[in-house]
Amino acid sequence: MKTMKSSLLVLLLVVTNVLSANAISKKDLDPSLVAKEIHELLDNPKFQINEELLASVTFTLNGENEIVVLTVDTDSLVLENYIKQRLNYNKLSLKLESQKLYKVPVRIVSTK
């Protein structure tokens, strides 16, 4: 009986530790917060924009919470290079899972 109680206690501690280690707050999972932070990093491009530019960016985070851009799906080579230069290895203030793939749409429009 004592062994059974000890085994249950150990199992309870292991399950509790696993669940608490994987817990991510709902605030950090809000896509609008991630989009806002990406927007700030891509704000004020230094190149001429004559038309609306669209892209789909797939990225992950490394162990130091830095963005690693994997792909930029766009027809504009200028936009692709701009996104990679602005986002690669910039830290996010939000705590997201590292090594997980994230995809965000990007739209850049002329301010004229």
Image: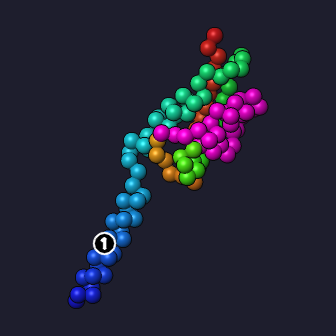
Quarter of the rendering occupied by the C terminus? top right
Q: Nearer the viewer, residue 42 or 89?
A: 89
Give the image quarter of residue 29: top left
Image quadrant where residue 52 sits: top right
Q: Residue furthest top?
A: 112
| Residue 104 visible in image | yes
Number of dots carrying numbers: 1
- Report x, y in % for residue 1: 22, 89
Residue designated by label 1: 12
Above or below residue 71? Residue 8 is: below
Who is closer to the viewer here, 88 or 74?
88
Residue 87 lies in the magenta stretch: yes
Q: Residue furthest left?
A: 1
- Camera-side residue: 107 or 64? 64
Residues drawn in magenta = 67-93
The answer to whether 42 appears left or right of 10 in the picture is right
Residue at position x 38%, y 47% in the image: 25
Helix, strand, or loop for circle 1?
helix
Residue 59, visible in the rendered structure: no
Instruction: From the top left corner, tell me how far across and down residue 62 is, in percent.
Output: 58, 50
Q: Amino acid at mark 1?
A: Leu
From what the image shows, is residue 84 above or below residue 52? Answer: below
Magenta segment includes 86: yes
